[in-house]
Amino acid sequence: MTFVNGLLGLHPGWRDLLEIALVAFVFYRGLLLISGTRAMQILAGLLVLVACYAAAWVLKLPMLTYLLGLVFTYGLVALLIIFQPEVRAALASLGRGPIAGFARRLDLADRAGILADAAMRLAARGTGAIIAVAHDVSLRSYIESGTALQAEVSADLLGAIFAATSPLHDGAVIVRSDMIVAAGCILPLSHKPLSDRTLGTRHRAAIGLSEETDAIVLVVSEETGTVSVAENGVLTRDISEAALRALLSGRRAPDVRRPAVDD
């Protein structure tokens, strides 16, 4: 009854309610970042270790308590290494504000038509391709993994790069502003489960890059001749040319298809 009476005697002010709401929002966003990834499994393992530590402390088992204490003491560095992709994605998402989004829409409007036309041409020929459109987050490390270029974006050039006889057709093309800055680039693979097991490495790489950066990644499937788009860790499949133009211009079209990543 004392605990209940203590709760009834509380008179939280607006600052307390604001603080509770902010803490709840931070925890909610954190869970969204790790939901469906290996980080969730690791977090469950950490909760088991915490429960074991509490049980050892209650039962007065000094050796087990000491060993688990060492794990918690020196585990922070290990966690930073293990959760590196998730931490990088979380830090990158902090820069995706409304002002940055408005500037991005203005920038994308100029190249939306060219990229949409190029993707549809490649799809019609059954040529596989992956094109990453850079925004605010730097793609420098991925650019350095490929061959540096400084060429104006054009549908014909993209078709030549992804032709089967081209030495750069296996990697990704990275577009920044109205320039192709690199080709044959290696992108990070996503660890999220995919609802369609027929999706290949290109689709997983597109999702992986969009998880870690604010890039929009176009994928053309050579097996199905369809175009997909990855943004913010979500893959939208079989998108029409009109919807693709709208998406690349920073708008949303009503005929964008369902995501291909399990929640």
Image (cartoon, grey):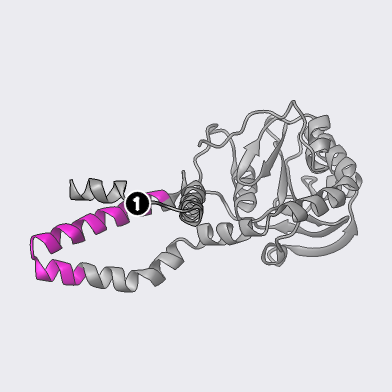
In depth, the one of 162 and 120 nearer the eye is 120
Q: Position of residue 159 (x, y in %)?
A: 85, 44
176 part of magenta stretch: no
Q: Is residue 126 left or right of residue 113?
A: left
Task: Tell me which residue sits at (82%, 48%) in the image.
Answer: 105
In depth, the one of 60 and 165 nearer the eye is 60
Place residue 135 in its image quadrant. Answer: bottom right
- Residue that sits furthest to the top in the current view: 255
Q: Position of residue 52 (x, y in %)?
A: 19, 57
Query: 10 Å neighbourhood of mark 1: few (<14), some, or many (≥20)?
Result: few
Main SS, magenta region, reads: helix
48 part of magenta stretch: yes
Q: Is residue 54 left or right of residue 126?
A: left
Is residue 231 visible in the rendered structure shown here? yes
Task: Tell me which residue sits at (71%, 47%) in the image.
Answer: 217
Residue 169 versus residue 236 in the image, above or below = below
How many numbered badges does the structure rendering display? Answer: 1
Q: Position of residue 53 (x, y in %)?
A: 20, 61
Q: Is residue 104 left or right of residue 72?
A: right
Give the residues drawn in magenta, as a range: 40-67
Q: Position of residue 162 (x, y in %)?
A: 79, 47
Place residue 145 in its image quadrant. Answer: bottom right
Q: Which kind of residue does numbered mark 1 sit on?
A: Leu
In depth, the one of 146 and 135 nearer the eye is 135
Task: Tell me which residue sits at (67%, 43%) in the image.
Answer: 230
> Quadrant where the N terminus lies?
top left
Is residue 133 visible in the rendered structure shown here? no
Disc 1 is placed on an element classified as loop
Q: Is residue 94 left or right of residue 263?
A: right
The residue labelled by disc 1 is: 10
In depth, the one of 147 and 210 nearer the eye is 210
Residue 221 versus residue 179 in the image, above or below = above
